[in-house]
Image: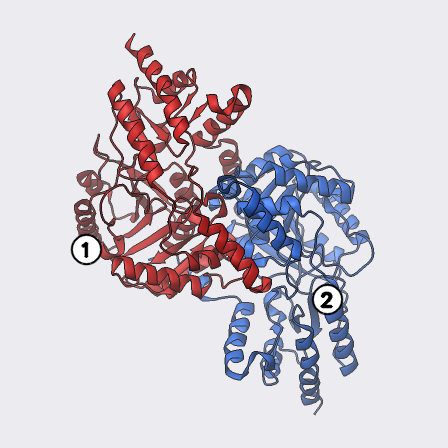
Chain colours: A blue, B red
Amino acid sequence: MISQKMLKLGQQSSVIRAISEYGNKRKKEIGAENVYDFSLGNPSIPAPEVIGDTLKELLDTMPPCALHGYTSSAGSMEAREAIAAHIRARFGAPADGAHIYMTCGAAASLTISLHALLNEGEEVVVPAPFFPEYRVFVEKAGGKLVPVPCHQPSFQLNLEAMAEAITEKTKVVLLNSPNNPTGAVYTRESLEALAELLKKKEGEYGTEIFLLTDEPYRELYYGEGLLPWLPSVYDRTVVGYSYSKSLSLPGERIGYIFVSPTCPDAELVFAAVCGAGRSLGFVCAPSMWQHLVTRVQGVTSDVEEYRGNMQILAGALSEMGYVVTPPEGAFYLFVKALEEDAAAFCERAKKYELLLVPSDSFGVPGFVRIAYCVSRETIEKSLPAFRKLMEEYKK
Amino acid sequence: MISQKMLKLGQQSSVIRAISEYGNKRKKEIGAENVYDFSLGNPSIPAPEVIGDTLKELLDTMPPCALHGYTSSAGSMEAREAIAAHIRARFGAPADGAHIYMTCGAAASLTISLHALLNEGEEVVVPAPFFPEYRVFVEKAGGKLVPVPCHQPSFQLNLEAMAEAITEKTKVVLLNSPNNPTGAVYTRESLEALAELLKKKEGEYGTEIFLLTDEPYRELYYGEGLLPWLPSVYDRTVVGYSYSKSLSLPGERIGYIFVSPTCPDAELVFAAVCGAGRSLGFVCAPSMWQHLVTRVQGVTSDVEEYRGNMQILAGALSEMGYVVTPPEGAFYLFVKALEEDAAAFCERAKKYELLLVPSDSFGVPGFVRIAYCVSRETIEKSLPAFRKLMEEYKK
């Protein structure tokens, strides 16, 4: 008898993956241009040219044994110092390479941090909706996920509900802003209020509560100025970052964990991160990609493309009568389904070759997620299909 | 209170890493050319030129979104089919892409396989000496490591001792041949006898026992012909492979898990592998490296360099009076320490700037591991130091 838990996780592939696989099959049947596949958060904008150029330069100039060799398990100190310098310059916040641990992307940043922080049975409070794999990661680390619904239709933090959900068992509050799947960006005021709440609860229970932030969408922000840097708002913060979306490198698996130097016992937290990475089998983050990010701090893909997609789609859908909360970041539109059962709605959308993801596995019923990281052509060609879908419900 | 287990793992870095860090410090003090650092298994031979050339070709010809995009979580089917074709051609054994799962290197191959196979408290029998991280990986997956000493000085399997160690709790036998740290290659006869033993024990206990093979050193073999392909010897076999040593890409983290199609319930085992990879946070293996290995099946670094190092070092040490078992593969020499306490011996070796790893953490006392994946110059310059060390003990 092999591990039945792992078997179950392997057999029940995620809803998102299942729809994406249906999409691939359907594209083969009727041609890719006739399927409006909004299922996957796979960046549609190519990596900036400087990425390929820098990789070639690395191949031409670095000795192969240095370029492809092991780095220390926390990563190349050169990469970690470059990231720290970028954080200091951008956020005016303390940062040093000694508190940065290079990872194989955002998922690894989360699983390693969760294994480092959690003891069996401790709780992780997460605003809902949330990325469904959070549940898998938290449970594997021995924790219990506690979703707390956000306000609707803004999808901003509901602090009263969070105050109720935070108990003496709460070890981590997991935030993802800009948010997958809603595109909401939590306001500075709400984050500061959350920090106050956490400090109060820590005092009340005599516990430690960590803020763990999942930030693959940090650079995909459509508003003015900078998003708040959470370690400047709350000391006990661990940031999980990934270059997957900002540099359009999702398959390459490169990111980092930043333990705020202002976090009490930061050195111990960092050591536990190193221990967790080691025990899960992450020897080091891919070395050539570490050398690459050392050289391209501050570079991002051209996110204006996504903004354009969003404006066209959100505008047209609203006009047709869909209830849309305009996203402030990421590349997802979260739209109210036209019937209570979002999965049934997605099934009907398939008739028009529209592939949408029902919101249930994100922890909120009655919505669909539309990943608009697709070509402009797909956006434009999909509009008549959305119109027909609406008409069907109006009948 | 963060996870004390992870903290402990992070604070007690491996003995190998600690010696390597001392070496880096010492090199800064007295010059790299004056330190004979035999601590790390970091390949000294550069990746073959075709690696850099193929990467540049991929960058020039593949659209960035395809090159750097997510693959399916088990990996690009093109890569998996290329690997399967290579296995079929090389070993005349059944193989197909559907049973291959691309991983972030050997450590990931092991942690994912162990999480897929083990239930809490089940035992993993491993011939000793063994790579020390095995204990970390097995315990994290909920299992218990059961080391079984090999015959000395051949370091071949002791089948009688293994027969005694295999109980109804045994779920996995973990093999590593060519072996780290001894360089021993288990004979075909002993592997066939082991397969018979496992079948007998399965019958006796009504259990399933998996053979899990850790094969990063498969291509580093100094003998004639091919090493036995374990899935052809024993049905219930899962192979963990890595390109780290064979292509000198240890930092890039690329390898695979092969579930033998002859394994009963191979589909279920494969699904559990997928579930384990998902829950540990491995989204997919680095995509560009997957596209790379698709194109270079059968290519290896020039391992003759290692053979040359081994012959010079093993020859000279034997002549000086050290007890050396000539290795048949990998790039390690396992040498009897000149006093009972291997750690004390390594401390004395440091006086002559010789950095050796004591065998205790490999599960066997009284030896040292010498990683001879260093420059020929280091090998040659180190010989007088080894001689002085011997002379000190003869006094």
Q: What is the chain identity of the residue bearing mark 2? A: A
Label 1 and label 2: CA atoms lie apart by: 62 Å
Above or below, B94 against A61 in this view is: below
Q: Amino acid at mark 1?
A: Gly
Mark 1 touches mark 2? (CB < 8 Å): no
B113 on left or right of B169: right
x 71%, y 44%: residue? A201
Which residue is painted at 83% across and 57% down in the image? A224
Q: Give percent across and percent down for residue A242.
A: 62, 52
- Looking at the rendering, which quadrant does residue B203 occupy? bottom left
Q: Nearer the viewer, residue B344 or A139?
A: B344
- In the displayed structure image, the side of residue A309 where residue B187 appears, left or right: left
Using residue A60 as the reference point, say whether residue A95 is left or right of it: right
Residue appearing at x 50%, y 42% in the figure = A64
Look at discs 1 and 2 and give the one toward the viewer: 2
Label 2: how many Cα within 10 Å (few below 14, some 14–19, many 20+): some
For the residue carrying disc 1, how many other residues have a C-alpha within 10 Å: few (<14), some (14-19), or many (20+)?
few
- In the foreground, A183 or B98: B98
SS state under label 1: helix
Q: Front-most of A63 and B136? A: A63
Vertical comparison of A75 with A187: above or below: above
Q: Quadrant of residue A181?
A: bottom right
Name the secondary structure under disc 2.
helix
Q: Quadrant of the N terminus of chain A?
A: bottom left
Q: Which residue has dot 1 on it?
A: B203
Q: Quadrant of the C terminus of chain A?
A: bottom right
Image height of B31 relative to A363, above or below: above
The type of residue carrying mark 2 is Glu
Asked which quadrant contains residue A365, the reply is bottom right
- Kindly identify which residue carries mark 2: A305
**Can residue A134 be seen in the rendering of this structure?**
yes
